[in-house]
Amino acid sequence: MDKGCILVTGGAGFIGSNFVHLALSEGYRVVNLDALTYAGGSFVLNDLLRHPEHRFVNDRIENREVVDIILRQHAPSAIINFAAETHVDRSIDNPGIFVQSNVVGVQNLLDAAVRYQAGLADHESRSFRFLQISTDEVFGSIDGAAATEESPYQPNSPYSASKAAADHLVRAYHTTYGLPSLITVATNNYGPMQFPEKLIPLMILKAVRELPLPVYGDGGNVRDWLYVKDHCRAVLAVLEAGQPGGTYNVAGGNQASNLDVVRKICRSLDRRKVMTGGGSHEELISFVTDRPGHDRRYALDAMKLMTKLDWKPEADFETALEETIDWYLDTPDFWKPIIGSSYDGHRLGLGKPE
Ligand code: NAD
């Protein structure tokens, strides 16, 4: 069944590409706008480029002319914005590009959406949606009860501050211009296609190469882990049935410290292969100076999404983590080019290409 066309931005990245696969399988036609930064990969696009209902446009969300042309030519019923600079460490080194993509880019998409909606016929205008993908990091470090959709924003890194700014713009465009916008705020994702700068794939690839596993501070920072496919189902549920102007938290319900997650990965690899010279991969763990402004704990209350839109996370953390490790071990074509790329340099520290 043809569910019409949607514009997905950032669909060559980790979550965006998983979402594009889901949307295509659900009968949507997808225009995918992505700048192909270091995080957007040709491997990720391989399957998608062969799909007859997928169109790829290599450009930036800040490009007003390109966004206007896409909207005019493809007449999508929704814009779903995954495009962003996403790595906290890089935002500490270079906040400017985060403001550029995550704030200026979102403002450009919002302006384009307002112009576009104004030209739609009544029935198309009523069903049009703008959906912004956000992060639990906007709430800052959580001491007690999990953050609800009403909790105050207290971002602590340039990354989370740029995402918070975008969320405020999205809400403001709803109240000021009546744009039917929605926001999903999700916890830490894991799963296939994640660029190996993020904790889980970085630790898998370092451990398998028997390199030191750098854990920030005492490793006690707690994150809630959400399987990417559960996140994508939540995004689709909000797109199809969310209340315009609303925000929906998406949580995996798997709180674990970074150290616990790294240990789980090590134990899983121990079961698959003995380290050179014997011993456990856990011996590779090395505590390093903490990240400045490192939030201690993130936690979201996803009750609204669960009760109003009947969504719940389906993945079991242990099983989905095993499957994720399998995927990285079985898919070197995804990460081997990254090891050899100039981006790798000193940052990923994954050693030399083979
Ligand atoms: P990612 O870094 O893997 O992918 C981002 C994609 O956006 C890349 O393909 C990149 O090329 C593209 N992009 C970046 N700047 C762009 C620009 N200016 N114009 C066009 N394309 C651009 O990120 P991800 O982990 O898939 O995250 C996707 C979204 O979900 C982000 O908005 C992020 O803030 C949010 N989010 C991520 C997580 C997580 O755990 N990864 C959790 C909650 C929310």
Image (cartoon, rainbow, N blue to C red):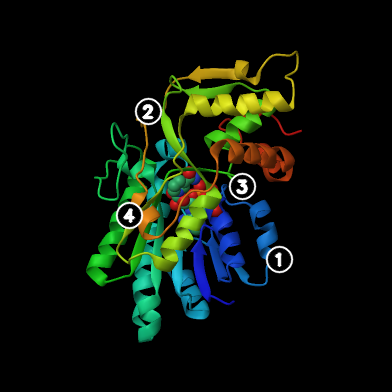
Q: Nearer the viewer, mark 2 or mark 4?
A: 4
Amino acid type, callout 2: Pro
Tell me the residue that label 2 is attached to: 292
Counting residues from the N terminus, which is met first, the one under dot 1 or under dot 3?
A: 1
Amino acid type, callout 1: Arg
**In this rendering, does residue 157 appear at all?**
yes
Tell me the residue that label 3 is attached to: 193
Q: Residues under labels 3 and 4: Cα distance? A: 25 Å
Nearer-the-camera pick, 131 or 320: 320
Residue ID at (43%, 43%)? 187
- Mark 3 CB lies closer than 8 A to ligand 1: yes
Q: Residues under labels 2 and 4: Cα distance? A: 24 Å
Q: Position of residue 192 (x, y in %)?
A: 62, 46
**Image marks 2 and 3: residues in contact by CB distance under 8 Å:** no
Nearer-the-camera pick, 285 or 317: 317
Tell me the residue that label 1 is attached to: 50
Position above or below: 281 against 91: above
Nearer-the-camera pick, 268 or 180: 268
